[in-house]
Amino acid sequence: MISVDSNILLYAVRSFEPNHVEAKNLLDTILSQKESVAFTDIAINEFLANATNRRLSVPVTSIEQAVSQVKNWLSAPNVKVIRNSPQSFNTFVKLCERTGRSGQEIYDAQIAAICIDNGVTEFITNDKGFEKFTELRIRNPFAA
């Protein structure tokens, strides 16, 4: 099962991003395959927050447009949403302890824990912070 970070989702909808075409094509490809794709609820919420945040970029995406896009992604037959559970909290704590995560870095550990406990094997992101989570295969589609 594959999971996708919020940065990939943002690049896929923002035509002004340098990685837009590659991210959009990547999402289109994985959403049309048979392999399962899992979006964490956190990545969805981060996408919505960042896409609609006027302080982060202009032009901003309206909440209606952003929600419509998420609904479109979630309508693919191979997509599901995965969430925190008591088990993923325990995994999260272990990941934080092993990697020394604290402060804002804990959110990456939370996403990784959810993915690990839900059977995700590959996580697609442009965030190098995930590389310490060796339980997941991390793929940066923009790395040379």
Image (cartoon, rainbow, N blue to C red):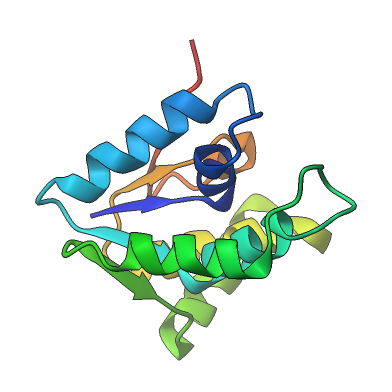
Q: Residue at x 60, y 39 (%)?
A: 14
Query: Left of 74 or right of it: where is 14?
Result: right
Asked which quadrant contains residue 134, the reply is top left
- The answer to whether residue 23 shows anywhere in this view is yes
- The answer to whether residue 139 shows anywhere in this view is no
Q: Extreme left residue here?
A: 34
Query: Left of 127 or right of it: where is 119?
Result: left
Relative to 72, say whether 21 is above or below. above
Give how far across and how far down residue 79 sits, in percent: 26, 64
Q: Which residue is drawn at 85% across and 55% down?
A: 54
Give how far across and how far down residue 93 sits, in percent: 60, 72
Q: Extreme right residue here?
A: 55
Give how far across and how far down residue 104 sits, in percent: 79, 59
Nearer to us in this view, 105 or 57: 57
Q: Extreme bottom residue here?
A: 86
Q: Which residue is drawn at 90% across and 52% down?
A: 55
Where does the N terminus fall, quadrant-wise? Answer: bottom left
Give the number of callouts. 0
Give how far across and how far down residue 82 sits, in percent: 38, 74
Query: Left of 112 or right of it: where is 16?
Result: right
Query: Left of 99 or right of it: where is 28?
Result: left
Nearer to us in this view, 59 or 46: 59
Nearer to us in this view, 20 or 86: 20
